[in-house]
Image: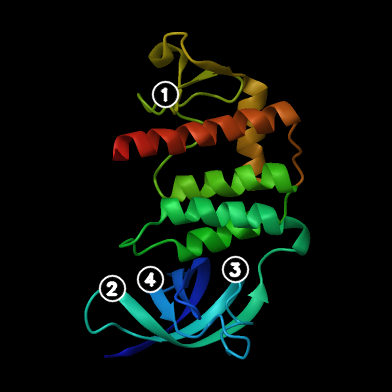
């Protein structure tokens, strides 16, 4: 059984037996992996202080002889990715990343790392929306704010679009149905993704959050 070493981001840990943890991680070179961290819940375990979410980790593990779960051999905690004030938003982002980059996907590390960087440089509420949306774009779940997602026509930012069935549509494709996305809202969301000095109103943040929820709900429906 070969040993591997890679940078990783911890998505979640699940208690297993009285002393161990099952880890779900996104790694830089190996994609998403699952590892058994034996004894990690014991007070004197070397894993206990290292296995922290929202830090860059360096892991060494043994590949499984059968199945898909490896065995953690060594863990080193490196730099934190968020200030303490944004830990809750970071945990919410990890939950989204776990859905966006499921088992068997060989991407996710760079996408999540970049999303955490977006969150770190923006207010917590709007930053979480921007970070989640960026991951959704890189995962192919959504397109940009400048094109109709049906006909691909470029729509300038001073025109109204419509949010319908988890898609951003031009007036022709939407047929005046769905939630209106005003030019001001669309421009603000578009700018907030790339510029840290853009502030969003509460109403725009709520609209963005509802759009994101709709996409995840649509994905869950299609999966079922």
Q: Nearer the viewer, mark 4 or mark 2?
A: 2
Residue under label 2, please give it.
Answer: 68
Name which of mark 1 and mark 3 comes first in the sequence. 3
Looking at this view, is 97 or 109 the one in front? 97
Which-is-in-front pick, marks 1 and 4? 4
| Label 4 – label 2 distance at C-alpha | 8 Å
Q: Position of residue 186 (x, y in %)?
A: 61, 28
**12 shown above or below 42:** above
Q: Which quadrant holds residue 172?
A: top left
Residue at the spot x=67%, y=41% of the render? 192
Question: Where residue 212 sits: x, y (%)?
Answer: 53, 36
Q: Is label 4 in a helix, a strand or a loop?
A: strand
Mark 1 and 3 residues: CB-CB less than 8 Å, in contact?
Answer: no
Name the quarter where the C terminus is drawn: top left
Q: CA distance from mark 4 to mark 3?
A: 15 Å
Residue at mark 1 to residue at mark 4: CA–CA distance = 33 Å
Q: Residue 165 — which label?
A: 1
The furthest residue to the left: 66
- Mark 2 or mark 3: whose residue is earlier in sequence: 3
For the residue labelled by badge 3, is the local secondary structure a helix, a strand or a loop? loop
Residue at the far front in the pictured view? 18
Q: How is the image coloured?
A: rainbow
Vertically, is 157 above or below 114?
above
Residue highlighted by disc 4? 33
Q: Quadrant of residue 188?
A: top right
Closer to the N terminus: mark 1 or mark 2?
A: 2
Callout 2: few (<14), some (14-19), or many (20+) C-alpha neighbours within 10 Å? few
Q: Residue at x 64, y 60 (%)?
A: 117
Residue receiving disc 3: 53
Q: Residues within 10 Å of mark 4 (few under 14, many from 20)?
A: many
Q: Are marks 2 and 3 in contact (CB under 8 Å)?
A: no
Total number of numbered labels? 4
């Amino acid at each position: 059984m070969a040993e591997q070493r890679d940078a990783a981001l911890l998505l979640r840990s699940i208690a297993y037996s009285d002393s161990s943890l099952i880890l779900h991680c996104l790694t830089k070179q190996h994609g998403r992996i699952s590892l058994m961290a034996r004894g990690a819940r014991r007070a004197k375990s070397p894993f206990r202080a290292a296995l922290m979410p929202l830090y860059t980790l360096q892991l060494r593990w043994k590949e499984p002889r059968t199945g898909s779960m490896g065995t953690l051999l060594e863990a080193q905690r490196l730099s934190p990715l968020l200030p303490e004030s944004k830990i809750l938003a970071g945990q919410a982002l990890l939950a989204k990343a776990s859905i966006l980059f499921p088992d068997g996907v060989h991407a996710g590390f760079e996408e999540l790392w970049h999303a955490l960087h977006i969150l770190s440089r923006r207010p917590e509420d709007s930053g979480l929306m921007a970070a989640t949306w960026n991951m959704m774009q890189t995962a192919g779940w959504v397109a940009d704010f400048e094109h109709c997602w049906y006909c691909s026509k470029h729509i300038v930012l001073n025109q109204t679009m419509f949010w319908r069935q988890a898609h951003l549509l031009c007036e022709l494709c939407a047929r005046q149905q769905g939630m209106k996305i005003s030019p001001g809202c669309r421009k603000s969301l578009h700018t907030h993704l790339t510029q840290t000095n853009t502030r969003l109103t509460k109403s725009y943040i709520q609209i963005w959050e509802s759009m994101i929820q709709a996409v995840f709900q649509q994905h869950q429906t299609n999966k079922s």
